[in-house]
Amino acid sequence: MAAERADVTNRKIYIMKTGEPVPKVRERRGEFADLITGVIGDAWSGDYETFDAREGGPPDMRDAAALVITGSAANVPNREPWMLATEGFLREVVGLGVPTFGICFGHQILAQALGGEVQRNPRGREIGTRPIHRLADDPIFDGLPEVFRANVTHVDTVVRLPRGATALAKNDLEDHHAIRFTETCYGVQFHPELDADVMRGYIEHRWEILAGEGFAVETLHADIEEGEFGRRTLLNFIRYILPRRAR
């Protein structure tokens, strides 16, 4: 699949920080921005800039190459003031046509900002390396099989899509594992940036909670995979969607 060409490498990819990894993962592997840029690697030769959505004063995005929104332990249904401000900012960014990619919490807050709804998932927590079923062909799935495995950790879910959005992937616990909101705006409920080491760190951090919820935690921990196909969705966004940046 050939990417649409546009010279945007003189612009920055902005990473919106909305939370931190669990403590031991953060100590060992760094912030979400470190994990995200590590996945992107040499697929992007331009610069990055990270800002924290919780601290206010977001940057001017008119000249941005793209925006990537991190995951978070925060919950969109709590409707905290910084989340409401972020939703207004995201509506402006998407309206500008800036290529935007939301991960987990980032995926959910995009849905809420654009007119959808996020709630606690009535099917319960989803965590570990999980099978995900594609529902449609899309550039972010280039090179992926119809059913792929990705690393996941979340308790909330998009229960209602914004008008005009398309569900691209699902599984037994999540109806909206990937959403195309617009031609240049995507969200994924799974975590492209979490490799096996990081995913195991999340399970170890929540071991007692998971056991109390009835998970077979030792099996869950042993079955973790690298999540290569999940990582490819972020790479495909960089290769195929980012070049659509409006001039």
Image (cartoon, rainbow, N blue to C red):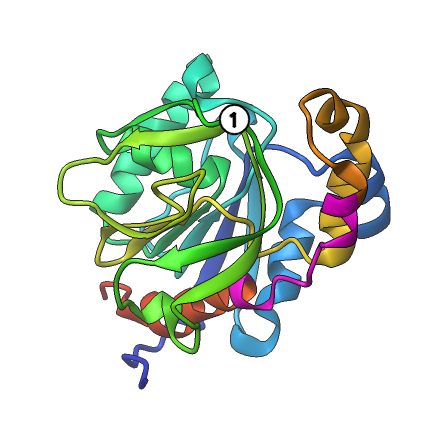
Q: Is residue 117 visible?
A: yes
Q: Left of 170 or right of it: where is 164?
A: left
In which image quadrant can residue 63 be found? bottom left
Q: Say which quadrant the N terminus sits in.
A: bottom left
Q: Position of residue 33 (x, y in %)?
A: 63, 50
In which image quadrant can residue 119 be found? top left
Residue visible at 76% across and 37% down? 217
Q: Position of residue 24 (x, y in %)?
A: 85, 39
Q: Position of residue 191 (x, y in %)?
A: 56, 50
Local crowd size for mark 1, using a 10 Å CA cut-off: few (<14), some (14–19), many (≥20): some
Q: Which amino acid type corresponds to the residue marked 1 in the rendered image? A: Gly
Q: Position of residue 55 (x, y in %)?
A: 56, 25
Name above or below for residue 56 compared with residue 242: above
Residue matched to label 1: 124
* Residue closest to the far left: 164
Residue visible at 26% across and 36% down? 91
Q: Left of 172 or right of it: where is 72?
A: right
Q: Say which quadrant the C terminus sits in.
A: bottom left
Q: Which residues are magenta?
A: 219-230
Q: Secondary structure at mark 1?
A: loop
Name above or below for residue 60 compared with residue 246: above
Q: Is residue 30 visible?
A: no
Residue visible at 41% across and 31% down? 157
Q: Toward the viewer: 6 or 63?
A: 6
Q: Left of 124 or right of it: where is 187?
A: left
* Residue closest to the far bottom: 2
Q: Toward the viewer: 149 or 239?
A: 149
Name above or below for residue 108 compared with residue 180: above
Magenta-drawn stretch contains 220: yes
Magenta-drawn stretch contains 154: no
